[in-house]
Image (cartoon, rainbow, N blue to C red):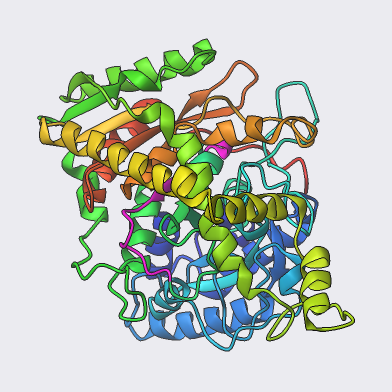
């Protein structure tokens, strides 16, 4: 054995894959190293449920496959699963009290695909309740603590949301990669906050079947990992047509990893002028310009583009998403599964169960959604928001029709903020974290966040690339160029261990 288990958690997913195949260490050693790391990092609250016995059993099978020369694409690689993906026989909570005690009798298609390809399950990861949040502070099971700290401070920071557990676990080396979901930025924003890579694929690339729904026309699964290559490897396994999901697209899954070496020579990268928002920190602007320079130096042509309806994206999103949430969450009534609080009659039981089971942010969004769908307001709000959504999509279509191959923007308007710092602020201030990301969901496009530098306090900042529909390959190629130019950000030292 050339590596000690204590060092195995520092490997990237690709390095671990190659090490397993070279028999430098076993899948069991790799799983045990991560199990031990998770046990020392509970203060981060990244995992809602640890599944060490299952992980070791899956690792044993992986070692048998490796010994027989029958390795599958993800053989023996330990992953964390966002607790929005239903896992057969393993509690699934969506970060909410209302799903307390729920153990699905089925497996989400995305997690099924990962197990089919040989991955090992370490546990279920924390998230904002029903994926509604940008900081992972709305989880019924407490906030996730970012492994990052500001220089000279031990104040606890948010990892971003809603996939905060996924991003924190990857950054803290508690898994080699993680599943995540993105409805308005919930993969890309936490990735940017934690110095990790996250890709939201095109709507329809990954099946939504077995994933707890937030806003069905916006939700999309994707991976968070430590490098662009690692996310490409994971997305290849997560993707694919699924007859159980009518929004799943029947297209072949490309070899995403092979696209990494393409480079950007000859590509045209658009810089949208509308993304220069008022009050954007100078360091975000500098990073954006630096990203354009890196791509230009690698052979890309940089052009300015206009996406004129960008200013309406956030208000339209916060009509469409809560409207769909209010419909989707109507199924949680205390009758069939999860929490049940008795009432004097069935209506009373519904009311008591929902009052006790849903958190404040979820209640807020259900109420907004119910309001915009109600008689007299449907045309004024929901129909108008859908029309704006069509215009946002058309803006991107026109940019791509003009010859633009991908669009470069900041991933977030700032670095991570402290836990509780925005707790008493207007909820709209929290929603503004999604200003650069919601357009991608509204238009159903792919977007990737890649770490590109540190702010003045030593915290990670990310750049976002937005691609044409089902052209994730170009995003991986351009993301690889940024990653190589920026240099991999050193992950934080384990102050929690």
Q: Dividing the picture into quarters, in which one does residue 297 lie? A: top left
Q: Nearer the viewer, residue 142 or 67?
A: 142
Q: Nearer the viewer, residue 170 or 250?
A: 250
Q: Nearer the viewer, residue 431 or 288?
A: 431
Q: Dividing the picture into quarters, in which one does residue 439 lie? A: top left
Above/below status of 459 relative to 127: above
Q: Position of residue 181 (x, y in %)?
A: 49, 57
The residue under the point 71% across, 69% down is 49
Q: Position of residue 398 (x, y in %)?
A: 17, 34
Q: Dividing the picture into quarters, in which one does residue 338 lie? A: bottom right
Direction front: furthest residue: 376
Q: Position of residue 423 (x, y in %)?
A: 78, 36
Whether residue 239 is in magenta: the answer is no
Q: Position of residue 21 (x, y in %)?
A: 37, 69
Whether residue 207 is in magenta: the answer is yes
The residue under the point 68% across, 30% down is 417
Q: Which residues are magenta?
A: 193-208
The residue under the point 33% across, 66% down is 239
Q: Main secondary structure of the magenta part?
A: loop
Asked whether residue 165 appears in the rendered view, the answer is: no
Viewed as shown, does residue 50 lie left or right of 114? right
Direction bottom: furthest residue: 105
The residue under the point 20% across, 44% down is 261
Q: Nearer the viewer, residue 425 or 138?
A: 425
Asked whether residue 391 appears in the rendered view, the answer is: yes
């Amino acid at each position: 054995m050339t590596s000690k288990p204590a060092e195995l958690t520092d490997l990237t997913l690709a390095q671990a894959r190659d090490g397993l195949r070279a028999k430098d260490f076993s899948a069991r050693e790799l799983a045990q190293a991560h199990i031990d790391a998770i046990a020392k990092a509970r203060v981060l609250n990244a995992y809602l449920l640890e599944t060490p016995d299952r992980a070791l059993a899956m690792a044993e099978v992986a070692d048998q496959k490796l010994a027989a020369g029958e390795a599958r694409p993800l053989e023996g690689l330990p992953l964390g699963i966002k607790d929005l993906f239903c896992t057969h026989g393993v509690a699934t909570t969506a970060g909410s009290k209302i799903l307390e005690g729920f153990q699905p009798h089925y497996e989400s298609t995305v997690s099924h695909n990962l197990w089919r390809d040989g991955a090992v399950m370490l546990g279920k990861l924390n998230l904002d309740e029903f994926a509604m949040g940008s900081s992972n502070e709305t989880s019924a099971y407490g906030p996730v603590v970012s492994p990052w700290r500001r220089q000279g401070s031990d104040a606890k920071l948010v990892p971003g949301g809603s996939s905060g557990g996924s991003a924190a676990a990857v950054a803290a080396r508690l898994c080699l990669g993680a599943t995540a979901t993105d409805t308005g930025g919930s993969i890309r924003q936490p990735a940017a906050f934690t110095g990790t890579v996250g890709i939201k694929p095109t709507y329809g690339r990954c099946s939504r079947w077995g994933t707890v729904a937030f806003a069905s026309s916006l939700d999309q699964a994707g991976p968070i990992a430590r490098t662009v290559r690692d996310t490409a490897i994971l997305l290849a396994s997560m993707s694919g047509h699924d007859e159980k999901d009518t929004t799943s697209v029947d297209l072949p899954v490309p070899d995403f990893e092979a696209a990494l070496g393409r480079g950007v020579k000859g590509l045209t990268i658009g810089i949208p002028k509308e993304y220069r928002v008022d009050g954007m920190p100078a360091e975000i602007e500098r990073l954006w310009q630096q990203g354009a320079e890196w791509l230009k130096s690698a052979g890309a042509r940089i052009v300015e583009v206009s996406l004129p309806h960008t200013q309406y994206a956030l208000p339209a999103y916060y009509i469409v998403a809560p409207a769909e949430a209010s419909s989707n969450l109507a199924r949680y009534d205390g009758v069939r599964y999860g929490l049940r609080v008795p009432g004097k009659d069935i209506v009373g039981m519904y009311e008591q169960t929902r009052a006790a089971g849903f958190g404040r942010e979820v209640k807020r969004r259900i109420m907004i959604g119910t309001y915009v769908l109600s008689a007299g307001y449907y045309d004024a709000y929901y129909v108008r928001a859908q029309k704006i959504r069509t215009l946002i999509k058309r803006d991107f279509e026109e940019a791509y029709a003009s010859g633009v191959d991908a669009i470069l923007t900041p991933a977030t308007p700032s670095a991570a903020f402290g836990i509780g710092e925005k707790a008493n602020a207007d909820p709209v201030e929290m929603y503004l974290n999604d200003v650069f990301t919601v357009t991608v969901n509204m238009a159903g496009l792919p977007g990737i966040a890649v770490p590109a530098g540190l702010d003045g306090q030593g915290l990670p900042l990310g750049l976002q690339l937005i691609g044409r529909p089902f052209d994730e390959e170009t995003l991986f190629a351009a993301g690889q160029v940024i990653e190589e130019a920026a240099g991999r950000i050193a992950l934080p030292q384990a102050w929690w261990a």
